Structures are given as C-alpha cells and as structure tokens.
Image: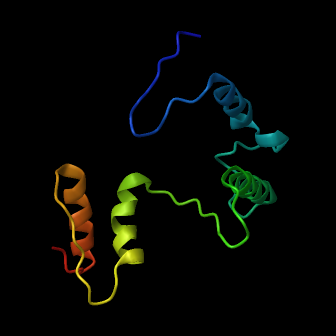
C-alpha cells in the first residue's frame, strides 16, 4: 500500500489501516451474511446488533447512566445550526448571535428560517 497521509479536514477523517481492513472484509459479506454492510436492512437482526453494540460502547466510553439516551444523528456540524434553536430557544425570547463570518452567518440564517427573533 502507498504511504498513508493524514487528513486534518473537519470530516471525514483518516481512518487507521486496521479499521479500513475490517471494513474491506465486511464490505462484500458483513459477518458472513452474504450481503454488504451497505445492503443490510435497517430493520434486520444484523443491523440491530450493530446499533446495540455501538450504543453500549458509547455508554461505556462516556460513562453514561440510563438517565441519558444515545442518538446517532446524521448531518454533521451544519445540522447543529438548525437543531440548536429548535432545542434551546425559549418562547418569546430573542436569540443573540455574534456574526464573525461564514459559520455564524449559516447559524443565523437557519434560526431565521425557523422564524426566530435573531439579534
């Protein structure tokens, strides 16, 4: 294999070679199922096992009690721009943003799309 390079972009990240090798093995036949992991139904036993394992590992890593739910949400950092006002804005209260450039402009725009009073 050619020399591996490091990627310092916000995502996706460079993966360790052992992880890539495991992905390669499971890409054609995930855990001997005869299907790629990309073909396994999200309603299948195989997927349920993967999800349960990921949740349990996350709980152990972060030392989470049963008081917390583990959610895996797609969308990346930009998705947070709409989730923050949805979850944290108080009714009737304005949202104060400091516009410092590209990223804060995106956050402000998402709050305005939701009809929030942005100042």
The residue under the point 73% across, 70% down is 66
Q: Is residue 100 left or right of residue 24?
A: left
**Viewer-proximal residue, 93 or 115?**
93
| Residue 15 position within the rendered picture, expressed as x and y whole percent measured from the top left | 57, 30
Quick check: 89 above or below 8? below
Residue at the outermost top position: 2
Quick check: 44 above or below 96? above
| Image quadrant assignment for residue 52 | bottom right
- What is the image's colouring? rainbow
Quick check: 8 above or below 117? above
The residue under the point 27% across, 90% down is 92
| Residue 108 position within the rendered picture, expressed as x and y whole percent measured from the top left | 22, 65
**Viewer-proximal residue, 25 or 112?**
112
The residue under the point 16% across, 58% down is 99
Q: Is residue 9 left or right of residue 35?
A: left
**Viewer-proximal residue, 37 or 3?**
3
The residue under the point 38% across, 69% down is 84
| Residue 37 position within the rendered picture, expressed as x and y whole percent measured from the top left | 69, 45
Residue at the outermost bottom position: 92
| Residue 35 position within the rendered picture, expressed as x and y whole percent measured from the top left | 74, 44
Q: The C terminus appears in which quarter of the rendering?
A: bottom left
**Viewer-proximal residue, 35 or 42?**
42
Quick check: 65 above or below 62? below
Q: The N terminus appears in which quarter of the rendering?
A: top right
């Amino acid at each position: 294999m050619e020399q591996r390079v490091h990627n310092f972009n916000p995502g996706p990240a460079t993966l360790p070679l052992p992880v890539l090798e495991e992905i390669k093995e499971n890409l054609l036949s995930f855990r001997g199922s005869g299907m790629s992991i990309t073909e396994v139904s999200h309603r299948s036993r195989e997927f349920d096992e993967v999800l349960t394992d990921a949740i349990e590992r996350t709980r152990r890593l972060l030392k989470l009690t049963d008081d917390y739910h583990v959610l895996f949400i797609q969308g990346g950092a930009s998705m947070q721009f709409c989730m923050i006002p949805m979850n944290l804005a108080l009714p009737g209260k304005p949202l104060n943003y400091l516009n410092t450039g590209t990223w804060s402009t995106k956050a402000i725009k998402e709050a305005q799309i939701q009809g929030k009073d942005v100042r």
